[in-house]
Amino acid sequence: MDDGVKKKNLLDLQFQKYLTLASTSIIIMFTYLVGVGIAILTKQVDLNDFIVMGILFVVSGGILGICSALFFKAIFHLKNIPEVIKDI
């Protein structure tokens, strides 16, 4: 097998990995926000309780922060792939 074909196949696998990571992180963030929104609208979360809101804020910050970091990392790698293709 040609060396260029091997590099292209590895690059395709890397592209798929980062594309999957970006789309999965968006889906998780959207699902989490919809779930929290439904919980607030159905009054499952008491907005007047400081402790509950503090816990919700910390958990939301953690989940959305991790998902955002993974999303931006994947987008950064996806933007670098065309430059790598030029080198092949």
Image (cartoon, helix red, strand yellow):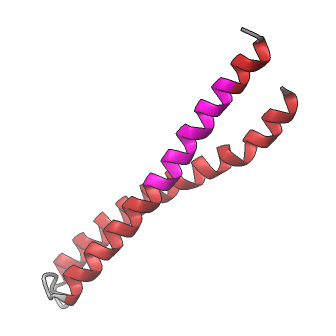
Pick the front one: 80 or 54: 80
Name the residue at 39% across, 69% down. 30
Main secondary structure along the magenta-highlighted residues: helix
Q: Percent position (x, y) of residue 81? A: 73, 40
User: Vertically, is 32 above or below 73?
Assistant: below
Q: Percent position (x, y) of residue 41? A: 22, 89
Q: Which residues are magenta?
A: 9-24
Toward which corner of the image does residue 56 lie, by quadrant?
bottom left
Q: Is residue 64 magenta?
A: no
Toward which corner of the image does residue 8 lie, by quadrant?
top right
Q: Percent position (x, y) of residue 58? A: 31, 67
Name the residue at 74% across, 42% down. 80
| Side (left or right) of 8 relative to 14 | right
Toward which corner of the image does residue 61 lie, by quadrant?
bottom left
Q: Quadrant of the C terminus?
A: top right
Q: Is residue 18 magenta?
A: yes
Residue found at the far right of this picture = 86
User: Vertically, is 30 above or below 69?
Assistant: below
Q: Percent position (x, y) of residue 72? A: 59, 54
Q: Quadrant of the N terminus?
A: top right
